[in-house]
Amino acid sequence: MKFVDEATIRVQAGNGGPGCVSFRREKFIPRGGPDGGDGGDGGSVWLEASRSLNTLADFRVNRRFAATSGEGGSGNQCTGRGGEDLVIPVPCGTRVVEADTGELLGDLTRDGERLLVAAGGRGGRGNVRFKSSTNRAPRQSTPGTRGEKRSLELALTLLADVGLLGKPNAGKSTLLRAVSAARPKVADYPFTTLHPGLGVVAVGPLRSFVMADIPGLIEGAAGGAGLGTRFLRHLERTRLLLHLVDVAPMDGSDPAADARAIVSELEQFSPELAARERWLVLTKTDLLLPDEVAAHRDAVAEAIGHQGPVFAISAVSGDGVPALMGRVMSRLEEMRLEAERAEADGADAPPAGEISP
């Protein structure tokens, strides 16, 4: 299935049913009085996060959704049937924006979380609602209100603990294949990866994390060049970034210059993302002599002024990969403990359940 991470849809809530004008007619009761019932409420439209979905491809064809309207009231003070709510499943990590105003309506990140995007109309009032001591036979009623209609922009951001970034052919997909069951395409030409991918990395019993791979970045990506700028947002929810640098690029470029270019594009795209914890990982060390690996690793880290951890690995031979994954798992566990402590100290925790804009 084609990966789709953006979609525009239109939703229409149901209209409220009209109120009824009716009078009681029974034998031996000449003045039965008004008995027109209210109209039923229209159905609302909800978006619900579902972990069974991982793309917005279902919205490529079906882009219009409408809930049912309420039925009109009837005699004997009967209220019309209400319209059924419409629940639209979307992948976890979907951000919802109103297209006309640009307002952020909600961000669905947890399985089962719901967002009300269009409220149904209220049912109209029947003539029984208008009777009084001075108006014994009212002949007025009210129509139901119209349901909300909205145009929505859906943007999917993958939910992952670790994000991989680097230039094309830096070895991101190869690493993901080596440490998880994911099978992204790997080839000896640039831009092999055309859409983001996820893989679950198991480090030990009950110890695992999710890793995200995005298309390679090139210089000018923040301005729209290449494929990476469209998918950089998939790294926004990650807690740790692994910056992969090819120690022996096919085009003969300088690895340090390549690393600086990626850092520059990251800063232009999002200063917040650039400030996130980022580890430097030199890949394809199997192309170097064993005594050259440490020198290349230190030279690249010094050239770009990297202050965090630095690793040298070969996803093909497996050198350094288990140690890297173990360090990543340990760091993620530390982050989780820090988050739990912060929450225990009174930090605001994200609310669960339904969200209303």
Image: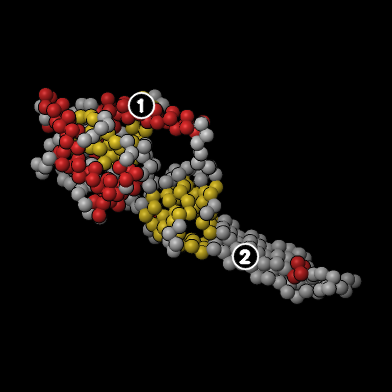
Q: Which residue is mark 1?
A: 330
- The image shows residue 127, relative to residue 235, as above or below, that is below
Q: Quick one: SS at disc 1?
A: helix
Does 265 sit left or right of 237 as displayed? left
Q: Nearer the viewer, residue 189 or 138?
A: 138
- Residue at 46 percent across and 49 percent down: it is 107
Total labels: the figure holds 2
**Viewer can see residue 330:** yes
Asked whether, in this view, residue 21 is left or right of residue 108, the answer is right
- Could you say where residue 328 lies in the image, as x and y percent from the top left? 32, 30
What's the colour scheme?
secondary structure
Q: Hey, which residue is sitting farthest right in the picture?
A: 28
- Say which quarter of the image contains residue 71: bottom right
Q: CA distance from mark 1 to mark 2?
A: 55 Å
For the residues labelled 1 and 2, say whether their Cβ atoms are less than 8 Å apart.
no
x 71%, y 62%: residue? 79
- What is the crowding at mark 2: few (fewer than 14 residues within 10 Å), some, or many (at least 20)? many
Q: Position of residue 264 (x, y in %)?
A: 23, 45
Label 1: few (<14), some or many (≥20) within 10 Å?
Answer: some
At x 50% / y 41%, what residue is drawn? 350
Query: Can residue 72 be spotted in the picture?
Result: no
Q: Compare residues 293 and 10 and report the one nearer the observer.
A: 293
Q: Residue at x 67, y 67 (%)?
A: 124
Residue 91 x %, y % = 43, 47
Mark 2 residue type: Gly
Picture coordinates of residue 276 (x, y %)? 33, 39
Give, as a three-letter code, the residue at label 1. Answer: Ser
Q: Nearer the viewer, mark 1 or mark 2?
A: 1
Q: Secondary structure at mark 2?
A: loop
Q: What residue is disc 2 on?
A: 16
Front residue (pair 263, 252): 263
